[in-house]
């Protein structure tokens, strides 16, 4: 086998050690994403690429790699950054990292649900102003989750189900969009299924857990937001482009939606300044899977996928 393994970003230490043990020449990027030119240079002549969600692996990148490329192992469960059809046409296997980040992403989601509902980030920012304050019956009150609030889970896959489990422990009533995936009896009983329009109308908090596909691009648009309650909150830990930011800002500015908590953004890493200006919006920098162990597991799984393909075996987690 001739060709190198191109790792576009520095992975966790244990994964970098696993990369070194593969016994193939390695080209490793930096902590920061490669520029477009660096990406093209790095892939040229590679047999395998470990990419991250910040790398756009399109047909031009696959072409620049050359015909010896066998696998693109994306360090993420989402793979909207990879042109899977183009890869398939070129005989390149694409893998992702499902399963190992469900708990971490669900934890962060619950953190954002709580932060938006109970105005935690707003309270933190307020204290840091140094303004005088004293406890008051009307001070910074928010949505009581445990007083019969309803959470709407859009996308009842692995992460959506992990969110629903946590939500039930907070005494939330949980709705979910119908799924074709196989469910255990407990997973079926944990939620009530509602089509999206009804779920949006019936939820106090709506949380997004669907993949970004042509079908879910701007799924939350003006019409969807108009279905939501003016007191409702929107949480997005999935992909920024599932939400039409212009529509979201309009709804928030006009008081047609009470608040939002966003971990992902359209045109990431750019954060729309109109969102930054809204106190009822909680913002985090794509931290969904950012647990120490979770990131090790994701990077490790990507490296194991590369090892499997280079050894002539089936990858552990090919994208479907
Ligand atoms: C993170 O966003 C992922 O897709 O794993």
Image: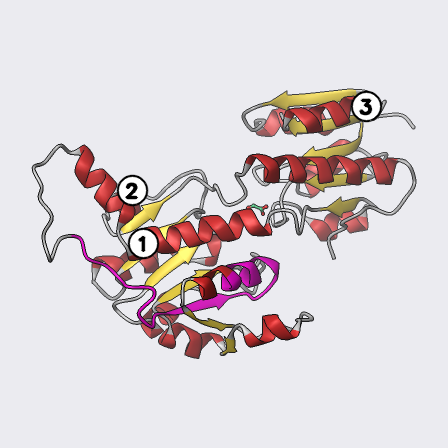
- Residue at the image point whose x is 59% and y is 52% from the top: 102
Q: Which mark is residue 273?
A: 2
- Whether disc 2's CB lies below 8 Å from ligand 1 is answered no
Q: Nearer the viewer, mark 2 or mark 3?
A: 3
Residue 178 vertical position relative to residue 302 in the rendered view, above or below: below
Image quadrant for the N terminus? top right
Residue 311 vertical position relative to residue 169 in the rendered view, above or below: above
- Residue at the image point whose x is 66% and y is 39% from the top: 297
Q: Which residue is mark 3?
A: 21
Q: Which mark is residue 219?
A: none
Q: Is residue 240 visible?
A: no
Q: Which mark is residue 116?
A: 1
Tell me where residue 117 sits by quadrant: bottom left
Magenta segment, which residues? 140-165
| Residue 125 percent across, percent down from the top left | 22, 39
Number of other residues with Cα within 10 Å of mark 2, as a class: few under 14, some 14 to 19, many 20 or more: few
User: How was the colour assigned to the protein in this rendering?
Assistant: secondary structure
Looking at the image, tell me whether mark 2 or mark 3 is earlier in sequence order: 3
| Residue 307 percent across, percent down from the top left | 83, 35
């Amino acid at each position: 086998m001739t060709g190198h393994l191109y790792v576009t970003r520095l992975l966790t230490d244990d994964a970098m050690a696993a990369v070194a043990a593969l016994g193939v020449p390695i080209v490793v990027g930096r902590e920061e994403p490669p520029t477009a030119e660096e990406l093209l240079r790095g892939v040229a002549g590679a047999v395998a690429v470990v990419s991250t969600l910040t790398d756009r692996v399109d047909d031009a990148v696959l072409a620049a790699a050359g015909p010896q490329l066998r696998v693109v192992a994306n360090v993420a469960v989402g793979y909207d950054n990879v042109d899977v059809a183009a890869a398939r046409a070129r005989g390149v296997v694409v893998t992702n990292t499902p399963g190992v980040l469900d708990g971490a992403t669900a934890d962060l989601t619950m953190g954002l649900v709580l932060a938006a509902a109970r105005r935690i980030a707003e309270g933190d920012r307020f204290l840091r102003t140094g303004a005088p304050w004293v406890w008051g019956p009307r001070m910074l009150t928010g949505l009581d989750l445990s007083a019969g609030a309803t959470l709407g889970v859009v996308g009842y896959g692995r992460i959506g189900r992990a969110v629903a489990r946590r939500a039930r422990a907070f005494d939330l009533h949980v709705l979910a969009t119908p799924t074709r995936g196989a469910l255990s009896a407990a997973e079926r009983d944990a939620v009530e299924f509602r089509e999206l329009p009804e779920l949006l109308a019936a939820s106090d908090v709506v949380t997004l857990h669907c993949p970004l596909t042509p079908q879910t691009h701007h799924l939350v648009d003006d019409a969807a937001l108009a279905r939501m309650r003016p007191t409702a909150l929107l949480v997005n830990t999935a992909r920024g482009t599932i939400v039409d930011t212009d529509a979201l800002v309009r709804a928030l500015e006009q008081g047609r939606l009470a608040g939002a908590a966003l971990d992902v953004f359209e045109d990431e890493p750019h954060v729309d300044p109109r969102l930054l200006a809204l106190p009822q919006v909680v913002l985090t920098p794509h931290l969904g899977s950012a647990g120490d162990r979770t990131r090790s597991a994701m990077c490790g799984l990507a490296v194991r996928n590369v090892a499997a393909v280079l050894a002539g075996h089936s990858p552990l987690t090919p994208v479907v």
